[in-house]
Image (cartoon, helix red, strand yellow):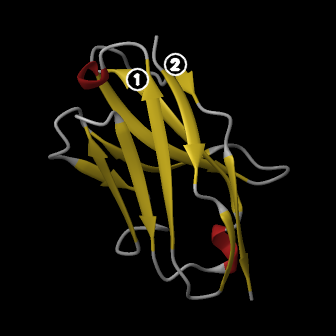
Amino acid sequence: QVQLVESGGGLVQDGGSLRLSCAASGGTFTRYQLGWFRQTPGKEREFVAAVTWSGINTYYADAVSGRFTISRDNAKKMVYLQMNSLKPEDTAVYYCAARLVTSSEYESWGQGTQVTVSS
């Protein structure tokens, strides 16, 4: 099973940008689809973006489409989330997750990184 560690969170002003990184270890990286999720207190974790094993296909939640970009570097075993035009409502803990291409559920999760957007 792959292990995931996120980094890159922080405090940014409304309209600013951040790039989150997620480093993977263990497992065969190209056997996994990678995703980003986020959660705020009192709310369920929600899907943000995903990228297939090849990096060719990407998927986004409507709330972030056009502002966020997910990408992966299979050689470095890294996945990224470039976040532009950030809004206060993007404030959350962001989690990196992985699921086998043969599975329907994400089974590996990072510890999360806090993103705070001030107005």
Q: Residues within 10 Å of mark 1 (few under 14, many from 20)?
A: many
Q: Quadrant of residue 26?
A: top left
- Residue 27: image location, x then y, percent: 37, 12
Q: Is 67 situated left or right of 110 in this image? A: left
Q: Residues within 10 Å of mark 2 (few under 14, many from 20)?
A: few
Which residue is more in the foreground, 38 or 10?
A: 10
Which amino acid lies under the numbered mark 2 shown in the image of this protein?
A: Glu
Which residue is more in the foreground, 47 or 15?
A: 15
- Residue 106: image location, x then y, percent: 48, 25
Residue farthest toward the right in the current orientation of the protein = 42
Q: Residue at x 43, y 57 (%)?
A: 81
Q: Are marks 1 and 2 in contact (CB under 8 Å)?
A: yes
Q: Is 47 situated left or right of 13 in this image? A: left
**Mark 1 highlights which residue?**
99
Which amino acid lies under the numbered mark 1 shown in the image of this protein?
A: Arg
**Mark 2 highlights which residue?**
107
Q: Earlier in the sequence, mark 1 or mark 2?
A: 1
- Residue 33: image location, x then y, percent: 32, 31
Which residue is more in the foreground, 54 or 8?
A: 8
Q: Quadrant of residue 30?
A: top left
Distance from Cα at disc 1 to Cα at disc 2? 6 Å
Please determine whether, in this image, residue 97 is positioned above or below residue 55: above
Q: Residue at x 23, y 32 (%)?
A: 53
Q: Residue at x 29, y 45 (%)?
A: 72
